Amino acid sequence: MNNSSSSREEIVLTENGEVFNPIKIGIASLITKILCCAIGIPLNISITVATTRLRRLHRKPRNFFLLAIILSYLSSFIVPIIELLYWVLEPDESLCHAYVAVIAVPQGLLLVNMLLALIDRYLAINHQLLHREKMTNRLACCLIVTCSILTVFLFKFIYIVGLDILRCEILLLHVQMTLILFIVLFVSCTAMNIVIYRQTKILLRESRTVEATPDNSVVTNNQISTVVTSMAVHVGRNKLGQLEIEATWTLIMGVTSLCVMPCLNILLIASFLSCRLIFGQSACDNFNEMWPFVKDICLIPAIYGPIIFLVRNKELRAAWTCQIIR
């Protein structure tokens, strides 16, 4: 009896004391999932195909990190597809097992691949020669595959090592491990975003200093020198302003994309665990009702994220446009 009681305390329950079914779909949630899948899956597949077909994009390792991010966005639709199949084919235990096995992994893969892309950009900015020499396409692919496998292992560590059996239920230990991993990845990505932004501002400030320095070949005439210096400063400031805006938007977009998907999960999980610790299981049933809503919101970045890349990446946009025209 004690073993049964302790085992029930280790899983998420409903207000009636029953085992909480992680797959719960209402009409609004059903419509949201269908719309997101109908838009997001073709969009991400088309970008993936365009990236893999155009050989010009294969020359730069950063495009492999971009492809990994797009594939992470695409993997976000695995969960809603399982939920839709579960709704259509009647409650199926095997589909629920697949759902538990996949949940939280796409967000983890997205954070890991974004962190790799940020580290790649940091090295490209601060250690250009070393980056060009060491960062090859093969190394980029190896890093992506290795880190992706490690991510899946860590997120599903409990089931992979056999600490528990995969069932249609949510383990509290699994929730706690997911929260820790989300926090570590989220803080790392945010920190790298800020570091890259500050480094970019320093480089822009240095470029402004260089731009403002007059050419020695035209200093012979004071009047001409004054005009050239004024023009150089004016052009330098205009270029600096554009680059600063671009760098700022890159930071805002990156942090926004991060906040919508994992940050909501972090807040929900942390609030649920805190509520459970302070008030007990019976007082925290509202979080079970909020879970489907948060899952639906987390699908939105998988749509606008690829659009942001298309808008800001000329090479990718050109390849994607050619793919669509064909």
Image (cartoon, helix red, strand yellow):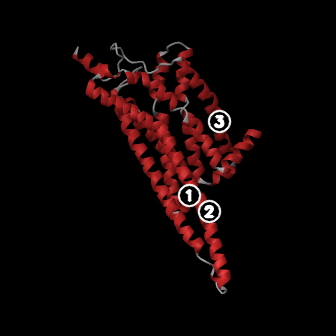
Residue closer to the observer: 211 or 12 = 211
Which residue is painted at 52% across and 47% down in the image?
252
Name the secondary structure under disc 2. Answer: helix
Q: Regarding mark 1 in the picture, which secondary structure is present there? A: helix
Q: Quadrant of the C terminus?
A: top right
Classify mark 2: residues with Cα within 10 Å, few (<14), some (14-19) or many (20+): some
Marked residue nearer the N-terminal end (3 or 1): 3
Circle 3 residue = 43
> Type of residue at label 1?
Glu
Residue drawn at 65 percent across, 36 percent down: 43
201 relative to 296, above or below: below
Query: Label 3 amino acid?
Result: Leu
Q: What's the CA distance linking mark 3 and mark 1?
A: 30 Å
> Marks 1 and 3: in contact by CB < 8 Å?
no
Where is residue 281, by image quadrant? Answer: top left
Note whether 86 is above or below 301 in the view shown: above
- Say which residue label 2 marks: 239
Between 128 and 272, the residue placed more toward the observer is 272
Q: Residues within 10 Å of mark 1 (few under 14, many from 20)?
A: some
* Quadrant that contains the N terminus: top left
Query: Disc 1 to disc 2, how far (Cα)?
Result: 9 Å
Direction from residue 309 to residue 149 in the image, left or right: left
Q: Position of residue 67 (x, y in %)?
A: 59, 44
**Above or below 117: residue 206:** below
Res. 319 in view: yes
Q: Residues within 10 Å of mark 3 (few under 14, many from 20)?
A: some
Q: Which mark is residue 310?
A: none
Q: Amino acid at mark 2?
A: Lys
- Where residue 114 appears, x then y in whole percent? 50, 46
Residue at image point 50% right, 20% down: 95
Name the disc covering residue 244, or none. Answer: 1
